[in-house]
Image (cartoon, grey):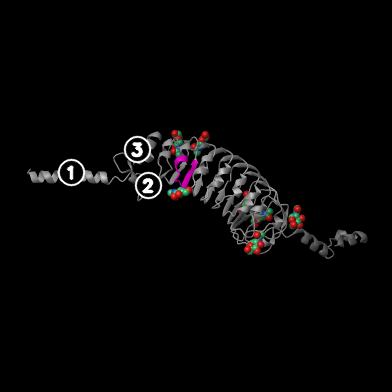
Amino acid sequence: MNTNSTLLLSLLIFSTLLHSSLSDLCNPNDKQVLLKIKKALNNPYILASWNPDTDCCNWYCVACDLTTNRINSLTIFSGDLPGQIPAEVGDLPYLETLEFHKLTNLTGPIQPSIVKLKNLKFLRLSWTNLSGSVPDFLSQLNNLTFLDLSFNDLSGSIPSSLSKLQNLGALHLDRNKLTGPIPDSFGAFNGQVPSLYLSHNQLSGKIPPSLGNMDFNVIDLSRNKLEDDASFLFGINKTTQQLDVSRNLLAFNLSKVEFPTSLISLDLNHNKIFGSIPTQLTSVDLQFFNVSYNRLCGQIPVGGKLQSFDNSTYFHNKCLCGAPLAGCKLMTTRLESKSLPLETPPSTKHFAPGSRTLALKP
Ligand SMILES: *[C@@H]1O[C@H](CO)[C@@H](O)[C@H](O)[C@H]1NC(C)=O
Ligand SMILES: *[C@@H]1O[C@H](CO)[C@@H](O)[C@H](O)[C@H]1NC(C)=O
Ligand SMILES: *[C@@H]1O[C@H](CO)[C@@H](O)[C@H](O)[C@H]1NC(C)=O
Ligand SMILES: *[C@@H]1O[C@H](CO)[C@@H](O)[C@H](O)[C@H]1NC(C)=O
Ligand SMILES: *[C@@H]1O[C@H](CO)[C@@H](O)[C@H](O)[C@H]1NC(C)=O
Ligand SMILES: *[C@@H]1O[C@H](CO)[C@@H](O)[C@H](O)[C@H]1NC(C)=O
Ligand SMILES: *[C@@H]1O[C@H](CO)[C@@H](O)[C@H](O)[C@H]1NC(C)=O
């Protein structure tokens, strides 16, 4: 081998080394933190690609920002991840998306170090087996646009401070074991009004009337133990599309309610709602409607979508009538009594004239 080719070879080796280290876009601190997270989770199979010899921007379940090359996303779902959320997740300061989803062996509390992630926009810890409370510190994550803690074992009450989150587009706390009332402050989101999902908990007491000040796109309070009034959630000038308060203990007069014409889905089933179905509802283009198992009465208004639903939308009420249920009893009774003389069964012919006059009285 002559000196020229030796030189060439070493140049080649050198440039390869140079290239490989330059191509490692990953921030060394981020890489170290991720390797600690992997270790804390006992090297699960789902993180097998987290090999220290490769660029962490190429690892599964993470993403780097295209300009800063800092880890901005950690999303782990559908794997066997026994244990708790490692505290080290709080040491990825550029994280905007954090997601642990469908990991039923993930237990313990919502990791307190998450409070350090001030750039967090999307936080989903759902379909896991997390317990403890919904932490107050979440309200410090100003940039959150999406917060989903649904399908867990979270207990205690909902922190009222969550209404400080000005950029929140959706709040999912459904399918937990939350107790106590809905915070009054949920009627005072200043900034964006989030779609609110609080169903399948054990929330109790009255729905704060302050919620009437908000124009929720979606509000789902179903399957709780909420009492009394909910009429203030409606309003002709709102733009609500989905409203579900089914399976609670609500008791209010529906007759005076004015429905937003934007409503697509309205579920009131299994409450103690009384009064009648307002005619104005015929001008709402509903795709889903259910008022079954209440104490409603009177004729189902004719028109709009109201006759397009089957009788299960209306059944088990006090005295609702008209299509798609049977005709109204009052009308039927009058028709029957008017037609009585024509259809008098033979036996009634022997009745005293006095009693027949009585039967014909309007
Ligand atoms: C949770 O752990 C149990 C026991 O180790 C295991 O059988 C199960 O498959 C795990 N669940 C998931 C979703 O991986
Ligand atoms: C969640 O944890 C409980 C015990 O805390 C356990 O009974 C249940 O199976 C777990 N859920 C799943 C889906 O693994
Ligand atoms: C987070 O919010 C602050 C203001 O609260 C803002 O200055 C910052 O740019 C936001 N960060 C991101 C990543 O949007
Ligand atoms: C709804 O908006 C119209 C037009 O802006 C207004 O005249 C009316 O008073 C509002 N109704 C209610 C109940 O706020
Ligand atoms: C419900 O409100 C309507 C309209 O104001 C009223 O006529 C009706 O008596 C009320 N129903 C009950 C049961 O209070
Ligand atoms: C509802 O409709 C079904 C099918 O048309 C009918 O069998 C049933 O008797 C009806 N129930 C009531 C309560 O009207
Ligand atoms: C309405 O709700 C009742 C009670 O959950 C249910 O049995 C019925 O099928 C529902 N009907 C429709 C049309 O959703």
Image spot of residue 322 (x, y percent): 71, 60
Marks 3/1: CA distance? Answer: 27 Å
Q: How many marks?
A: 3
> Which numbered dot is residue 13?
1
Q: Nearer the viewer, mark 2 or mark 3?
A: 3
- Segment tinted magenta in the rendering: 115-127
Q: Which comes sooner in the sequence, label 3 or label 1? A: 1
Marks 2/1: CA distance? Answer: 30 Å
Callout 2: SS? strand
Marks 2/3: CA distance? Answer: 15 Å
Front residue (pair 76, 302): 76
* Res. 227 image quadrant: top right
Quadrant of ligand 1: it is: top left
Do the numbered discs 2 and 1 sit on residues whose CB atoms are within 8 Å? no
Mark 2 is on which residue type?
Ala
State the residue position of label 3: 32
| Quarter of the C terminus within the rendering | bottom right
> Which numbered dot is residue 63?
2
Q: Is-magenta flag for residue 118?
A: yes
User: Is the shortest distance between ligand 3 and the CB of mark 1 under 8 Å?
Assistant: no
Q: Residue at x 41, y 42 (%)?
A: 93
23 sits to left or right of 251: left
Front residue (pair 185, 98): 185
Image spot of residue 350 (x, y percent): 90, 59
256 sits to left or right of 39: right
Callout 3: SS? helix
Q: Which comes sooner in the sequence, label 2 or label 3? A: 3
Work out whether residue 111 can be spotted.
no
Front residue (pair 34, 187): 187
